[in-house]
Amino acid sequence: MSLAALRRGDLAGARVLRINEDLTEFPDEIFGLADTLEMLDLSGNRLTTLPADLGRLHRLKIFFGSRNRFDILPAALGDCPSLSQIGCRDAGLTHIPGESLPPALRWLTVTDNAIAELPAALGQRPALQKLLLSGNRLRALPETLSAAGNLELLRISANAFDVWPGWVASLPRLAWLAMAGNPYDPPRPPAEHRQIPWSSLSASSVLGEGASGVVHRMLWKAADPAAAQPVAVKLFKGRMTSDGAALDEMAAMLAIGQHPHLTAPLGAVTGHPEGVDGLVMPLLPESWRPLAGPPSFETCSRDVYDPALRLDRAAGLRLALGVAEATSHLHARGLIHGDLYAHNILWDGERGEAVLSDFGAAAFCPSGAKPADLQLVEMRAWGILAAEIADRCTDGFPALQDIATRCQQPDLTTRPLMDAVCADLRSL
């Protein structure tokens, strides 16, 4: 898509519009799409504001303005009656006025800005479901947010919180929480881990890439160069992600220890020629794949499964128990995974053998927080996952569904902890 095509009228009737052409002013021609436009992506331009009459885009549902120069989140966004998702990463934001938040707001991403305070109006948006605030200068959350009954995902990593906001754990639907990299983090001793010289790694090919790093397939020549071992090596990009800082992810991974259902590192890379941080991990079989895809714009906080996926009860139980045991292991070490989703589970595609991966949102329990409270938040995430697994069992799985339901109760005090769930699953 291009500005020239828009001006020629080639994009008439478009529902989605993306323009990245170093814009300094909002093109008035966009208003010609007011009766159809649902998603507007103006990321990567040099805009400092939006027109006061932006509300004329009455069908607009999604606005992306990342990597612009806004300073203040434009108040005109709040006048868009259908707008439910705003994404403004690394947009130069220092201030979010309450009037910039549309009444239908469901998903707000303002990662990697310089925001020091949030408006009380944020807690007065009843549809709010996902809130991504990592990489800002926040010292507190507005108390009104404690009434956000639909909030399910919260990212507050890499901010300036001195004190843990304890009421966060009581949010009835909260399931996915990232909170590392704040001053409230407890002091912890350096993790004991093996150091693996970069010179002992060779023959790289890319296996995949995520927000925090690139994973390579390499050969590791350990003590015996003649018996090189295939491994996966994650090289971190070092930049801020929606989950938090890459180095916090690395610190969490080095602390998880070994477990058959976790992608635990074998050691940390040393001596990279460009000073890049990295971890060496066991290489999974090539046939293993994610259990589901990540949430879409429509599903917001729910993963997207292959409609054809069907499991027998044995595979479903093996999946649910493996992830539960992995999570129990993390909880015992004082860690919260923070992103317990099917798209972060790699499995064999048949028997239900699986590992939990992606520790970008993982965190140690903050000073002043009760570990059990944060574990009970994560129990809801596991409960949602278990219900999704039960739904895909060919002959149904009422017993697993019952356990999943107990883990999702709005009252956290009625949810079981993970050790109890593991015991229940082993008895099935």
Image (cartoon, helix red, strand yellow):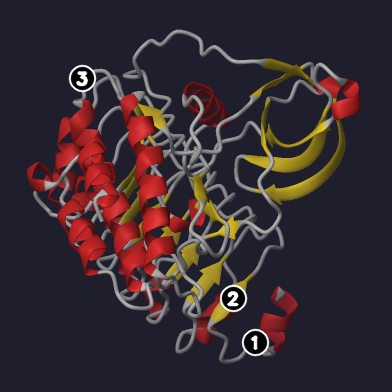
Disc 2: CA contacts within 10 A as few (<14), some (14-19) or many (>=20): some
Q: Amino acid at mark 3?
A: Gly
Q: Is residue 284 visible?
A: yes
Secondary element under disc 3, as helix, strand or loop, is loop
Q: Residue 144: image x %, image y %? A: 14, 45
Task: From the viewer's side, name the closer residue of 252 and 258.
Answer: 258
Q: Is residue 101 visible?
A: no
The residue indicated by pointer 1 is 11
Label located before the other in sequence (3 or 2): 2
Q: CA distance from mark 1 to mark 3?
A: 54 Å
User: Which residue does the image show at 36% across and 49% down from the upper left?
Assistant: 321
Q: Is residue 199 left or right of residue 105?
A: right
Residue occupying the far top of the picture: 189
In front: label 1 or label 3? 3
* Earlier residue among tags 1 and 3: 1
Who's the residue at 51% across and 46% down the image? 355
Task: Give the structural element (helix, strand or loop) at label 1.
Answer: loop
Q: Earlier in the sequence, mark 2 or mark 1?
A: 1
Q: Residue at x 30, y 27 (%)?
A: 139
Asked if residue 225 lies left or right of residue 58, the reply is: right
Rendering coords of residue 207 (x, y %): 74, 49
Circle 2 residue: 17
Q: Position of residue 311 (x, y in %)?
A: 44, 70
Q: Quadrant of the C terminus?
A: bottom left
Q: CA distance from mark 2 to mark 1?
A: 8 Å
Q: Nearer the viewer, residue 248 or 82?
A: 248
**Tag 2 secondary structure:** strand
As drawn, 268 above or below 380: above
CB atoms of marks 2 and 1 within 8 Å? yes
The crowding category of the residue bearing disc 1, from other C-alpha atoms within 10 Å (few below 14, some 14 to 19, many at least 20), is some
Farthest front residue in view: 427
